[in-house]
Structure formats: C-alpha cells, structure tokens
Image (cartoon, rainbow, N blue to C red):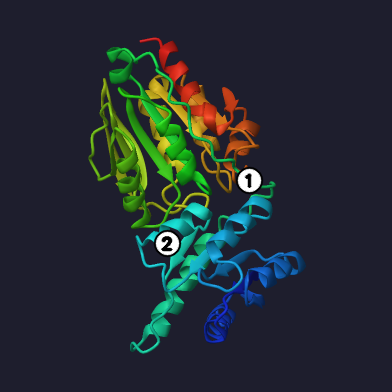
C-alpha cells in the first residue's frame, strides 16, 4: 500500500489555499495534513504535524515567506516548493527562494486562462514528487554565519598546475551562497572549474550570470561540448546531468537527461564519477551544504582514483546532509568550515604531483 506524503500548505489567500488543497488531495500519494495562513501559524503546524513537504507563498502578513523559509531551514529543514505570483522562472524572487533553501519555485496559476488549472495541477504534482523524492536530511540544520572570505595576497598558482588541475564543487540547499563564498576566496589564475548545484531549469543560468558579475572569472551555464579551460567555471544546467569526458589534458562536458539520481538532475555523483574515470588525480573536489546524500559515491570514486575531497563542516552548513554523507563514507580528506574551504583547495593544488 502506497504511503501518502504529508503536505503543509502555507498561503494567506483562502482561494489559493482551497485550490492547492483540492489539487493536491485529488492526486494519488499525497495528503494535505494542514494549511496555514501565515508563518507563525505554519511554525505551529510544522511542530504539530511534521510534514514531508511544504508549499510556501512569499508575500504574507507578519513575516514574508523567504525570511520564514530561512528560519525553517536553520532549525527544521523541510523539502519546500515556493508558489508565488512573484516566482516566475529566473525572477529575483525565485532566485531568493532557492537561495533560502527552496528546492523549487513556481508561479501561481492565472485563473482566467483556459485550461490554466489543469496545466498548473500537472506541473505542481510533478514538482511535488520530485521534491519529495529527495526527502528530509534527518540531520539538524545549522544557521550559516555569513563571513566575507579573506582577500589576503596569495601566491599565484604555477601555470603547470592551472593547466593540469580540475576543481569540482557539489552543493544543494544553501549552496548558492556557499559556492560564491568558496569561489570569492580564490584569486586568478585558477584551473578549470565544474559545479553541480541542485537547481531547476532557468535558475542555473541566472545563478551563473550572478556569479559572473561578482567574480573575476568566466562563469557560464554549461552547454554540451563546452571545453574545460583555466579560469572558466561551468555550471551544470537545471534538469541535465553533466559529465566530463576526454583525456591527455583536453576535457569537455557532456549533458544528458538520464533518469534522476537521488531524486535530482543534475546530480553531483554523475559529475564526480566521470571525473574519477578521466582525471581522478587531477581533481580537487568540495562537497558543500545540502539536503540528502548526493555526491558521496562520487567523492569515494574521486578519492580512490587519487583525487582529493574536502567536505564542509556541520557548524557552517545550512543543511548537513551531503557533507555528512561524504564524511560517513570515508571520502573526505579534510573537513573544513565554509570560510576555509577555498584555501584548503588552493593548498592541495600546490601539492599535486604532475
């Protein structure tokens, strides 16, 4: 017998609460256990019902949805979809929702459009299943203290290391800020960088653009066949796994839509395993904050192939799921607070035997 997923709906609009309740309740495998009219009501319902998934509006009285979501992720992480009239793909509100820990964001339906409700229902249920499949971490989340990385003068990496090495980063919940922090701690020149951050389509392109504005590097959402080269940062696009192929110093990425892994696409494990196959000894990898266990198997493969892996520590992780899985698997060469990960990766680069 299929176990229904418990859903909490948080929205101050009674019309939307009713609509979401009907849409979700009429879909097999879901049970709306409660609705909440604001963040404080939602807090009480979370404690009372312990939902598996939450839908959350942004514009609400007393406390906005983004601020509330950050508090939820800091104390009781729940897989969350933000549903808001502001959350159109690539919008500032949608990006803020993902930054705050939402696993997906989508706009509310436009009621007066023919067929809008059916389209919305199909889209919402598909997203709910995807989000729910990632599950809750089961590990307490921590409030990450934002700290500007130190911008001390650094000894430049030798050209031979820059040309030889590959940096790889995997992250999920809380990862957008964590990735930025790590990359800002690096000074040019840097080797090629490949990144998987769990994000839906469109969001990864905006994420890459925003990173590019604050970093002295080329940052792009990866396209199939893009070449790895020093100073270029490739972000796996939403809904596509990214793998590295090649050899003899000439590497490129391939994209595919194979089934989700750990409930996600892109998956860190796909990227890390490919790196282990084609250039393990070249690889210096980091697994940052995130819900679930994606990245642990790939980290094991990288380490077994002669590469090096650092995991973010529990104190500075927004959600200590993915790093913990890497540590538990014995794949972490080092465990570092967020503000020390970039420097740890630099130090390891100098140790590479070429």
Indicate the quadrant containing the N terminus: top left, top right, bottom left or bottom right. Answer: bottom right
Question: Residue at the spot x=35%, y=53% of the render?
Answer: 257
**Residue found at the far right of this picture:** 48
Question: Residue at the spot x=44%, y=24% of the render?
Answer: 284
* CA separation in Å, label 1 and label 2: 21 Å
Give the total of numbered labels: 2
Point out residue 103 in the picture as x, y percentages from the top left corner: 50, 57
Point out residue 26 in the picture as x, y percentages from the top left corner: 56, 83
Question: Residue at the spot x=44%, y=11% of the render?
Answer: 351
Q: Using the image as rendered, state which of residue 3 and residue 9 is in the foreground.
A: 9
Left or right relative to 148: residue 232: left
Q: Residues within 10 Å of mark 2 (few under 14, many from 20)?
A: many
Q: Residues within 10 Å of mark 1 (few under 14, many from 20)?
A: some
- Tag 2 secondary structure: helix
Q: Are marks 1 and 2 in contact (CB under 8 Å)?
A: no
Point out residue 208 in the picture as x, y percentages from the top left corner: 33, 46
| Residue 1 shows in this picture | no
Q: Vertical placement of 162 versus 49: above or below? A: above
Q: Vertical placement of 276 versus 102: above or below? A: above
On the image, numbered disc 2 is attached to which residue? 94
Q: Using the image as rendered, state which of residue 253 and residue 165 is in the foreground.
A: 165
- Mark closest to the chain's N terminus, 1 or 2: 2
- Tag 1 secondary structure: loop
Left or right relative to 103: residue 209: left
On the image, numbered disc 1 is attached to which residue? 143
Point out residue 206 in the picture as x, y percentages from the top left corner: 33, 52
Q: Vertical placement of 208 versus 149: above or below? A: below
């Amino acid at each position: 017998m299929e176990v229904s997923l418990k859903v909490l709906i948080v929205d101050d609009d009674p019309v939307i609460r009713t609509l979401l309740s009907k849409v979700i309740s009429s879909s097999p495998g879901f049970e709306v256990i409660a609705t909440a009219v604001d963040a404080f009501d939602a807090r009480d319902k979370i404690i009372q019902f312990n939902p598996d998934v939450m839908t959350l509006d942004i514009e609400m009285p007393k406390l906005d949805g983004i601020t509330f979501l950050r508090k939820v992720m800091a104390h009781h992480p729940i897989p969350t979809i933000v549903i808001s009239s502001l959350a159109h793909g690539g919008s500032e509100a949608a990006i803020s929702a993902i930054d705050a820990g939402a696993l997906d964001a989508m706009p509310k339906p436009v009621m007066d459009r023919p067929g809008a409700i059916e389209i919305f229902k199909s889209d919402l249920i598909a997203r709910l299943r995807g989000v729910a499949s990632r599950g809750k971490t089961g590990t307490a989340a921590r409030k990450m203290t934002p700290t500007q990385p130190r911008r001390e003068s650094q000894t430049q990496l030798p050209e031979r290391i820059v040309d030889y090495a590959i940096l790889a980063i995997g992250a999920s919940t809380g990862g957008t800020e964590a990735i930025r922090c790590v990359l800002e701690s690096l000074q040019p020149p840097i080797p090629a960088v490949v990144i998987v951050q769990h994000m839906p389509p469109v969001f990864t392109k905006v994420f890459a653009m925003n990173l590019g504005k604050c970093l002295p590097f080329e940052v792009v959402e990866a396209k199939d066949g893009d070449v790895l080269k020093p100073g270029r940062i490739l972000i796996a696009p939403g809904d596509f796994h990214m793998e590295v192929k090649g050899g003899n110093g000439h590497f490129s990425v391939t994209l595919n839509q194979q089934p989700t892994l750990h409930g996600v696409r892109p998956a860190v494990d796909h990227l890390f395993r490919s790196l282990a196959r084609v250039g393990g000894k070249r690889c210096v990898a980091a697994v940052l904050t995130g819900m679930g266990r994606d990245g642990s198997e790939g980290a094991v493969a990288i380490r077994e192939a002669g590469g090096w892996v650092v995991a973010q520590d529990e104190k500075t992780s927004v959600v200590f799921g993915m790093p913990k899985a890497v540590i538990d698997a014995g794949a972490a060469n080092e465990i570092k607070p967020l503000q020390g990960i970039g420097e740890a990766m630099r130090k390891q680069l100098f140790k590479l035997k070429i």
